[in-house]
Image: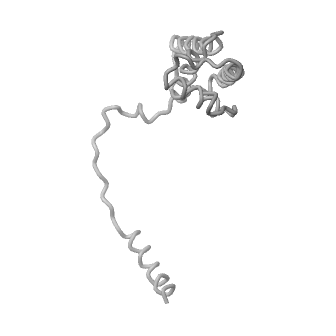
Amino acid sequence: MSSQISTNLAPSQHGNISKENRHLANFKPSFWGDICLSSPSQMEMDAGTQQEYEELKQEVRRMLVANTDKSSQKLPIIDAVQRLGVDYHFQKEIEEALEIIYHHHCNHIEIDGDDLYTTAVRFRLPREHGFNVHCGMA
């Protein structure tokens, strides 16, 4: 019985939708224009901006591969790069740095003087990248 009712109502509902005239809202033009609608891949960079972009990428790359004894200096950099969403530029460097930190941390525990943020990042980042970090190691 209910299937007969639903099949009988369906054509009339679809008919009403096509006959309905909807009014469009007359929004004012945006202050920003169309600049926000275009994606960054479509926007061209001038030579100076492109050079600055490459220099900044190299600086971040140097920070990631720098030979530092304390993981508490490198882990916040890796965390910031990931949170900014530019980690895809530095996947190889991040993986190598985390591997060094993981192997060094397994042999030498340097928890003394670390704050809660550093301890949490030391636990979270390697686990996100597939390293087996136990709760007692962080």
Is 26 on the left-hand or right-hand side of 99? left
Tally the numbered discs: 0
* Colouring rule applied to residues: one colour
Q: Residue 96: x percent and y percent?
A: 70, 21
Q: In x, y percent, where is residue 105?
A: 67, 21
Question: Is residue 17 or residue 62 the one in the foreground?
Answer: 62
For residue 91, what is the image quadrant?
A: top right
- Is the residue 15 above or below the residue 63 in the image? below
Front-lying residue, 84 or 3: 84
Which residue appears at 28% of the width and 48% of the height? Answer: 26
- Observer-nearest of 132 and 51: 132
Residue at (50%, 25%) from the top-left corner? 117
The image shows residue 5 at horizontal and vertical percentages of 46, 86
The residue lying toward the viewer, choosing from 126 and 13, is 126
Query: Residue 33: percent from the left, percent from the top?
Result: 36, 33
Q: Residue at 51% across / 14% down in the picture?
A: 49
Image height check: is 26 above or below 130? below
Q: Residue pushed farthest bottom?
A: 1
Quarter location, residue 22: bottom left
Quadrant (top left/top right/bottom left/bottom right) for the C terminus: top right
